[in-house]
Amino acid sequence: MFGVTNEHLVVDDLDFEVRRSARRKTLEITVDRGGELVITAPPEVADDVMTAFVREKKFWLYTKIAEKAALQQPVGGKEFVTGEGFSYLGRSYRLLLVAEQEVPLKLEAGRFKLTRDVAGDGREHFIRWYVAHAGPWLQKRVAGWSARMGVQPKGVEVRDLGFRWGSCGQAGGVNFHWATILLPATVVDYVIVHELAHLVAPNHTPEFWQRVARALPEYEQRKAWLAEHGGRHVVL
């Protein structure tokens, strides 16, 4: 009887931990939270088969590694002072500290306005604002793409997903990092389409990418933009 055994596989400039388990029937590659690359494989799969599998997935792997690195940029790059810029749907809005207003933070007349007495907790107030506005916006956007793609998620949630922009839950819902609302709408659409495609194709198989391409023929440009530029939108 097989348990889980670990070993390493190096493919070009990529170093993988191999986790073998009798419960696995297919190969799967994941990028762990710390950036480690992992292949989960059935016990009998040979190294040359895994190497070929990795090479087929190299573009996807480099993209995921870049996304993870971008989302893990150090927190604290913003100062909550008048004149600082904060993103919302791909545009930058200057912050204005005010003496008082009916809510701690709002976007009005092309500026974010934050009451001066809560500036010390500015990051928390911005995250709450982003989460509150991302929910309704994403619900509407997901509904539109769901109709076009012929799928129906069981729910849409906004949360902190660590280094992931989105995820597809086992129960059939889709989840999005609160920071997606900082990205340009066209890039958010790619994240939405990506997760909706997972409702039908759980893994990054050719079928999965075909579904993404049918919905967004130019998805590769948006995917590349996200990998290269996404991180600077989430430093807060």
Image: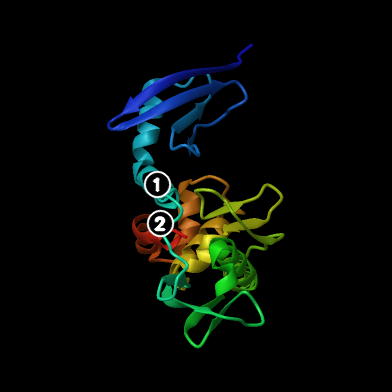
Residue 189 visible in this rendered orientation of the protein: no
Mark 1 surroundings: few (<14), some (14-19) or many (≥20) residues within 10 A: some
Which numbered circle lies on residue 200?
Answer: none
Which residue matches tag 2?
231
Q: Position of residue 159 (x, y in %)?
A: 62, 56
Residue that appears at 48% across and 46% down: 205
Query: What amino acid is at disc 2?
Result: Gly
Query: What amino acid is at disc 1?
Result: Ala
Please say if the residues under marks 1 and 2 sit with CB atoms less than 8 Å apart.
Answer: yes
Mark 2 surroundings: few (<14), some (14-19) or many (≥20) residues within 10 A: many
In the visual, does 221 lie left or right of 178?
Answer: left
In this view, the residue in front, 134 or 83, is 83
The residue furthest top is 1
Q: Position of residue 162 (x, y in %)?
A: 54, 48
Which residue matches tag 1?
69
Residue that appears at 40% across and 59% down: 230
Q: Residue 175, located in which quarter of the rendered image?
A: bottom right
Up the image or down, 169 lies above or below 222; here it is above
In this view, the residue in front, 129 or 15, is 129
Residue that appears at 36% across and 32% down: 52
Q: Quadrant of the N terminus?
A: top right
The residue furthest bottom is 109
In this view, the residue in front, 15 or 83, is 83
Q: Position of residue 108 (x, y in %)?
A: 54, 85
Distance, label 1 to label 2, CA atoms, is 8 Å
The residue furthest left is 12
* Count of picture labels: 2
